[in-house]
Structures are given as structure tokens and as C-alpha cells.
Amino acid sequence: MEQGEPTPDDENTPRIPSPRAAGDDLTGGGRGGSGTFVPGPREGNRFTPPEPEPHASMDPEPHSVPEPDPEPQAVPEPEATVHEPAPHEAHAADPPSHTVLKSLLGAWALAACSPEETDAVEAHLTECAPCADEALRLRDAVGLLHTERSLDLDPMLRSRVLENCLGRRPARIPVPVWAAPYDAETARLDALLNDFGDAEWHAPVRLKWFEQERRVTRRTTVAGVIGHLMAVDALVATALGLDEPVPMDPEAAAAGPTARTEALWRAAQSPLTRAVREPWREQSHTLIRTVSFAGRGVAELTVPYGEFALPLQDAMLDRAFECWIHAGDIAEAVDYPYDPPSGAHLHRMIDLAARVLPTTLAGRRRAGLAAPARGLVTAGSPGRSLRLEIEGVGGGDWHIPLDSPAAVASPEHEVAHVALDGVEFCRLAAGHVPPQDAAVGQLGDREAIRDVLFAAASLSRL
């Protein structure tokens, strides 16, 4: 037998006929079709007989033994064209196997497949549970390859764009340098609030600050925080002759930030909603326009805060600082990253806190919350000092007088040295970090260091 099979023992078994042309060689289609025969490749002047089919039928015909096919004669090769299916036709007729699709899962997880491969893999995942599980594991693994990045723009981008624009065409009415941090921080917070839905506006926020020797918290919502910022910003607005954004009784209006905030929260018939954003936003824009048109003399205008007062330029820095701190509280409540201010603005905020520290320390000493002065000196004379070293972006060195706000801090009279990161110091001054838990490098008089750290935490308020 030509196929290598054993010869039957029965002599009456009919002889198997010679192999016929394969069905694929017939352009008409099937094995029994009547299509035109396509000859095989030629060797010299003769055609090579077609190879037998691997699975040709071996069933003998029952009543007659056919004669073997005559050997084809050398005839001119007909000009027949074999139709080759287009790639999309072949794909449609013969979809990739399970093995092929499984091998594409890694590329699919990395989004590296072609559109056709992606469609085939995703169609397969709806039918094959093991591959679907493997695809989920690969997608999770791909997620670990990418570091988390904030969707926020670089906080310096706005400043660089404005600087470039103003370099080409200076502003006719520029924003004062001391008001630029407030302008930047309100713009950043407004961008954070831009895409908030109703659920985010009612997300719970826990405000934190430091009173006396303990940490105090207050629970509110994102909308409540914006209302708080608007109420305290109104202290600056009324000092500039602007109207109150929310009418309140004169006694509450003349009180400090805490009383004003409580009055605004009580004035609302129901919990504040996203509607509070527009009045806060309009008020911040009005403050920037007003101080820009007011000129240089307005920087020293006094802004009362109830128990104390600040010059307008320091009050605007204070509002920028609180806006950043509470924006961080909001971002934490909705689980969103939020970067600190730019280095130049952060340096100004730290400088304000360092300048206020001696007065705060003296007030704590009068209340019996700090150690008594060790050496009183006349106003303007050098006295004991603590060196406050702020590291990182916005950092620098400040010398804090310890015994009297009127004394002059001097490196020659330094008795203690404290080193903190800039953001850590701001969190301490905001009451978000207890003094005993702050990451502080310290050297020298321990009592003086403790008094200054607690005084820094006492700068915080609602």
C-alpha cells in the first residue's frame, strides 16, 4: 500500500484506487464538486502528480474495481487564478485559538494589542472564566508599575504663566506682592471644588486646632469649611469698606473668627450646600481687585480679629495660609492629593508665623502657660534667642526673642536651636500636629524649645 498500511490477507479484497486530486485543488469547492482542476507544480516538462490527501477515504467500492487514473499528459498550463482570502476574511473564518488569545493577555493588560486583537481578547474573556481571572490579575499588576501622581497641575504653573504674560505686557494695575499668595491659594482651592458633586460637598470634614494645652476638633462638611473661610475673609472685606457676604448681627460681626463662623453656620436654615461656593468665590475676587486698586498705602490698614489685629498685608497672608490648610482638610476628606504652596509663598507664610511668635509666647507667659522670663532687657536691646531653622522649600533662619517681644533677637545670645521641615512647621502652626509629636531637631535649652513649640501650636484657631 502506498500509504504504508498493512496489506489485507483476503485475496478477494478489492484493490484501492490511485489517489485523486485533493478537494482544495478544485476551484469549484467540495470533494465531489464539478469545478475546474488546477494542476500541481511542474518539473521540467511534466507536471508533478498531486500528493494524496492525508485523510482520503479508504472505503472500497462494493461492485467494481476502477482503473487507475492515467498519468496526466504534458499540456500547457492553464491560466487559472487561485483566490486568496483577504486578511479580514481569514480572521473571520478562523478565529484565534484559546492558546493564542491566552498568550495575548499580557499585551492586552499593557494596552499594547492592535484593535483587532483587543476585540478578540475581550470577546474571549466573556466566555472563558480562567482567562478572565488571569486578565484581572495582570491588570492589577500593571497598575503597580505606575506611581500615583496628582492630577493637579504644578502649583507654580499659574505663577509662571502670569509672570511670562506680565513680562510681555505689564499689568496696568498689578496685584500687590503681599496679596499674591492669597490670590494663588484661593484659585487652587476653587479649582479643587470645580468638579465636586453633591456628595463631595456634604463629605464630613474634621477641623483641628490647638487651645491652651490641648487639641480641639470640630466636625463640619466641605460646604461648612467654605462658609468658615468666607466668614473670616469678611473681616478683611469690612476693613476695606466692603459689604458682608452674609448679613449677621453687629455683635457677631465685631467678634473674632470663631464667633463669626458660628453665627454664619447658625444663620443657615439648613446645612450649607454647594451654593456657598459662588459668594465665597466672588468675595475673594473682590478682595483682590480692591487691594490692587487701593495702592500702596492700604498695606498698613488695620484689620481687627477680635482679640488682636493685623496690618492688611499680614492679614492677607494669614488668609492665604488658612485657605491652604483648609483646602488640605477638604482634599483629605475626599481622598485627593493636595500640594503645598510655592516656595516663595510658603516662605512668606512662615515669616509671618515667626514674627508673631514672640507676642504669642508673651501672652502664654502672662497666662501661666510658659516659663517666666529669665532676663528682662530694655526695648531694642539684645536678649536670649532661639534659632528657628526651617528646612526644605520656603525655608530659612529666624531668631526668636524669648524673654520679651520688644527685645532684639541676636545670634550671639542664642540659647537653643530648633530645626523643622517647612510644611511640618506650618502644620504645627495650624494645630494639625501636637507640639510633642512634631518632627523636630532640637539643641540647647529644653524649656525654651518647649515654650516656642507650644506657642507655635497656639497660633492655630478655628
Image (cartoon, helix red, strand yellow):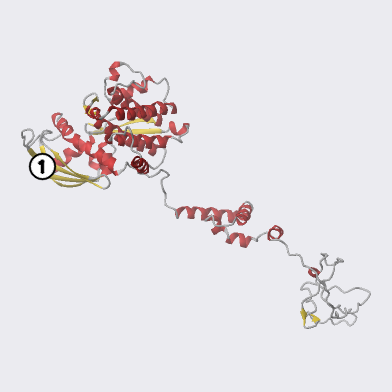
Picture layout, residue 100 above or below residue 341:
below
**Does the rendering let one see residue 224?**
no
| Residue found 22% across the figure and 31% down from its top | 212
Q: Quadrant of residue 320?
A: top left
Q: Nearer the viewer, residue 175 or 128?
A: 175
Q: Nearer the viewer, residue 294 or 205?
A: 294
| Residue found 32% across the figure and 16% down from its top | 249
Q: Quadrant of residue 52?
A: bottom right
Picture layout, residue 342 above or below residue 36:
above
Q: Position of residue 319 (x, y in %)?
A: 30, 32
Q: Quadrant of residue 388?
A: top left
Q: Nearer the viewer, residue 40 or 30?
A: 40
Q: Is residue 15 left or right of residue 315?
A: right
**Does the rendering let one see residue 167?**
yes
| Residue that label 1 marks | 410
Picture layout, residue 34 above or below residue 180:
below
Q: Is residue 90 left or right of residue 366?
A: right
- Quadrant of the image containing the N terminus: bottom right
How packed mark 1 is, by other alpha carbons closer than 10 Å (few <14, some 14-19, many 20 or more), is some
Q: Position of residue 357 (x, y in %)?
A: 18, 35
Question: Is disc 1 placed on a helix, strand or loop?
Answer: strand
Tell how many labels.
Answer: 1
Q: Position of residue 137 (x, y in %)?
A: 52, 54
| Kind of residue sitting beneath label 1 | Ser
Q: Is residue 25 left or right of residue 182?
A: right
Q: Is residue 346 left or right of residue 13?
A: left
- Quadrant of the image containing the C terminus: top left
